Amino acid sequence: MVAALSGCSPATRELDPGFGPSDIDYVEIYGYDYSGAPPEVSLITVTDRALLDSLGLLDLLVDKPVSDLDPDLADRVVGAPADGLRYVLRDGTTYEVTQVFVAVDEVVLIWPDGTAAESTFGSPISSEIEGMRPADPEDRPLADLP
Amino acid sequence: MLTGCSNAEPVGFCPADVDRIEIFNTYADHDAADYQDISDVETVDFLCQMVWVYDSPGLEPGSDSDLDGVGERGITAVVLHQGGDIAQTLWFYRTVGFDTQDVVAFDSGEVYLVAPHTLTYYAVASAEVVDRSAMPEQ
């Protein structure tokens, strides 16, 4: 029975980005419609901890359940709203990940090194927040699917 | 770890007449911590009599074994003051895994389990960054 079930749903694992809320200085959010070379990108830098908290950004990634990316889902990412997140930590390092919201419960995560995963958790931020301003697409976190 | 519904009654974390609350928050073995020193009466009462009572499910008795392996995620130390003395110190440990319960350890040695992310107040206020060594050790 277990073997049969395991074949039906992808194995879920939990992310460990290696940092928590107390490590975060600020977060840059790049919003765009996903493509390999988006023509237009907008940006907001969120430094206010109350706003970071209300946006769910402080512990967004810690233990977030993810699974291997389904190729069928990967085929549907182009044009979907994307949030490129750059966490700037208090020690000066950064952590980047891009979330692409293909549909409700269908979120694709892409890291700059080309690795990717999917999750049922997450909702768009850049399309819901005021104060986004135009940005250079080259500045966004890399998010190229293999 | 238990998750989901609980039959436990709401229970606060504060003894009577707390007049100052210090909150330290750090992550795993990192070198820095967020620090808040809260002494205005309204906020202290808000935390002790509202947030940590009505906004959280009750504590479920745990044991020392629940402390095994904690310390890999968020750690929050809360120091409750009463008339210039420390009345009680407690530590909230976020545990590994999605939606797993937090472990709460009191300085009396008691250990409890509580709903995940119960103690989040520190995050919504400005916090001073301090050296991890300033944070009370359990």
Image (cartoon, coloured by chain):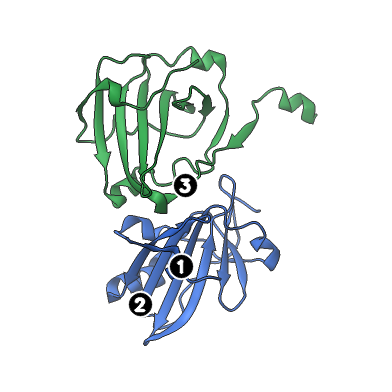
Chain colours: A green, B blue
Do marks 3 and 1 share a subunit?
Answer: no
* x and y, in percent, of residue B44 in the image: 34, 73
Residue tagged 3: A19
Image quadrant in which you'd find residue A124: top left
Amino acid under label 1? Ser
At label 1, counting other C-alpha atoms closer than 10 Å, the crowd grade (few under 14, some 14-19, many 20 or more) is: few
Q: Give the answer, above or below, for where B10 lies relative to A85.
A: below
Q: Chain of mark 2?
A: B
Circle nearer the viewer, 2 or 1:
1
Cβ atoms under marks 2 and 1 closer than 8 Å:
no
* x and y, in percent, of residue B73 in the image: 53, 52
Q: Is residue B39 left or right of residue B22?
A: left
Q: Chain of mark 1?
A: B
Distance of mark 2 from mark 3, alpha carbons? 29 Å
Image quadrant in which you'd find residue A6: top right
The residue closer to the viewer here, A69 or A101, is A69
Image quadrant in which you'd find residue B6: bottom right
The residue closer to the viewer here, A62 or A72, is A62
Residue A33 seen in the figure: yes
Judged from the image, the secondary structure of the residue bearing numbered disc 3 is loop
Distance of mark 2 from mark 1, alpha carbons? 21 Å
x 54%, y 38%: residue: A15
Judged from the image, the secondary structure of the residue bearing numbered disc 1 is helix
Residue tagged 2: B20
Q: Give the answer, above or below, for where A26 lies relative to B136.
A: above
Circle nearer the viewer, 2 or 3:
3
Residue B10 seen in the figure: no
x 44%, y 66%: residue: B52
Judged from the image, the secondary structure of the residue bearing numbered disc 2 is strand
Distance of mark 3 from mark 1, alpha carbons? 18 Å
Q: Chain of mark 3?
A: A
Residue tagged 1: B133
